[in-house]
Amino acid sequence: MTRLATSLVLNYLRKWDVTNCKRVDRFVGISKYIVERIKRNYNRDADLIYPPVDCSYFKPGLSNEGFYLMVSPLAPNKRVDIAVEAFNKINLPLIVIGSGQDEKKLEKMAGKNIKLMGWQSDEVVREHYVNCKALIFPGVEDFGIVPLEAQACGKPVIAYGVGGALETIVPLDENMNDETERSSHATGMFFYEQTPESLSQTVIRFEEVLDLFNWQVIRKNAESFDRTIFKEKIKKYIEKEFNKFKSGNGAS
């Protein structure tokens, strides 16, 4: 009975959502991933404006204490369990910052090489970005600001290759023979199966090619998403759409 009621309510909400979306003049997506979803679900075009990262706050520190880092709520959809299982297998140090419903479960899973720190302040998070070897990002996000915060600190990201991560991380191209070419734009690596095995294999490979990553290249990629750029883009967008509205050409 409860499932039936839930299904009926969700069905009603979907219809209400689709009907009312027609009243929206403009959609703005935070990633191509979301722009495509808006088109698929509502049959409406959307403009793209990426959210910002604060590059004045997150800065490189040029240190590496040898640990991998994950910064995330401890919720099922974040797939922290994949990271814990993978690092249990390869026995490399992993620090997880975040709290949530999976905390006790993950504490039971984690080996001695894994440290769960719970919630931490922005200052502590920034310190760990600066000191880590690389960020681990195994979930699927609409955009995902954490990979950009790590990159702003000059750190590469090992991420599941789906969703917003594809738009903020430049993967190492191992098909190129020239090492300079391979590393000239790379800011991380992707794994393409959302499993501990796929992640652990990618981390092992990352260990082998770590020297190909350049913190200045990684930082530069993050700077293309900086708050100053976002402010300018959103300002111009609002001005453009407001002028259309005033002239009577603003409606879809």
Image: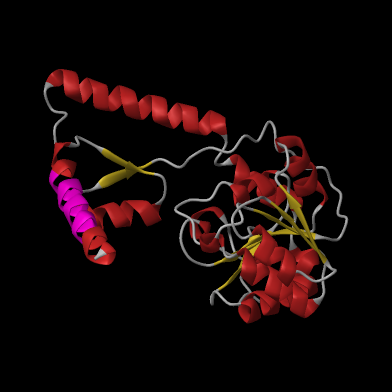
From what the image shows, is residue 60 above or below residue 250? below
Q: Is residue 240 magenta?
A: no
Viewer-side residue, 58 vs 70:
70
Residue 47: quarter of image: top left
Residue 86: quarter of image: bottom right
Residue 12, position as x, y percentages in the image? 17, 53
User: Position of 126 compared to 242: left or right?
Assistant: right
User: Position of 51 compared to 244: left or right?
Assistant: right
Residue 34, position as x, y percentages in the image? 36, 52
Q: Quadrant of the N terminus?
A: bottom left
Viewer-side residue, 231 vs 124:
124
From what the image shows, is residue 165 above or below residue 178? above
x 25%, y 22%: residue: 242
Residue 163 in sight in this render: yes
Residue 162, position as x, y percentages in the image? 48, 65
Per the rendered image, the range of residues in magenta is 8-19
x 52%, y 67%: residue: 161
